[in-house]
Every structure is written in C-alpha cells, then in structure tokens.
Amino acid sequence: MSPRPLCDICNRPILAGAQYIVRIDVFADPSIPDMSTDDLEESDSEKTMAKLMHEMEQLSADELQDQVHRRFQYTLCRSCQKEFLTNPLGRPRSFSIKQQGHN
Ligand SMILES: [Zn+2]
C-alpha cells in the first residue's frame, strides 16, 4: 500500500477520501492589448522587435518559461482546502477589512 499523501500546507497525512488537489496556472494574458493607430505610428516596430529579441536572448530558458507558463500543483487536506478557498491568493486578511475613517 502506498503511504498516505501529506498536505502541502500543514504537512499532515491526509485521510483517505479527504484529499484535494489545487492546480494553479500562471501565464501571460494571450489577448492583444488595445493600441490606437497613434501608438502604432509612434513606435518604431523594427527597433522594438530587435530590442525585444535581444532581451529574450539575455534570459535563461527558465526565466523565459516563467514568463510564458507556470503550473503549480498542491495536495491539500480538507481543512487546508477550506482555508485555501477563503483566501486563494494568500492576501493579508486585513486587506479586505479596510478601516473606513471618518475624519
Ligand atoms: Zn493541511
């Protein structure tokens, strides 16, 4: 029998049937940004392209991959799954409880 998987957050063995998988895909938005005709005329596209190619040569394959697509996968126990769903981006909790001053 294979050993019980460990929760990636609390590191405790996960009970059978209480295992959750979290997958996170991080990739560049493939949609083309809106550019007005003025923007296009202002930019020297050949120069920009050469600069971009040069910059890409400076990056390692890993860095390039980071910019294109990263996929993470985690195994969570039930209680950590609940925690995760309440705050998927790991934001500081105070962020949503913003104080509204009346001065
Ligand atoms: Zn856990």
Image (cartoon, grey):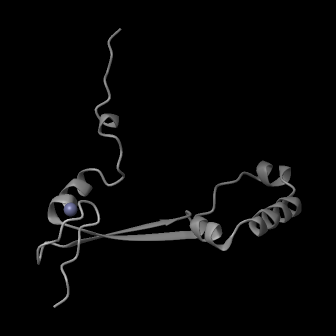
Q: Residue 99 falls in which quadrant of the image?
A: top left
Of residues 75 and 94, the one nearer the viewer is 75
**Image point 24% across, 56% down: which residue?**
85
- How many marks on residues? 0
- Residue 77 x, y percent position in the rendering: 18, 66
Determine whether, in the image, residue 9 is placed left or right of residue 31: left
Looking at the rendering, in which quadrant would you find the C terminus?
Answer: top left
Looking at the rendering, in which quadrant would you find the N terminus?
Answer: bottom left
Q: Vertically, is 57 above or below 92?
A: below
Determine whether, in the image, residue 1 is placed left or right of residue 28: left
- Residue 34 x, y percent position in the rendering: 65, 55
* Quadrant where ligand 1 appears: bottom left
Name the residue at the left extreme: 16
- Residue 52 x, y percent position in the rendering: 78, 63
**Image point 77% across, 65% down: which residue?**
58
**Image point 28% across, 32% down: which residue?**
97
**Image point 23% across, 60% down: which residue?**
10
Of residues 12 and 86, the one nearer the viewer is 12
Name the residue at the bottom extreme: 1
Determine whether, in the image, residue 68 is placed left or right of residue 6: right
- Residue 23 x, y percent position in the rendering: 35, 70
Q: Vertically, is 94 above or below 75?
A: above
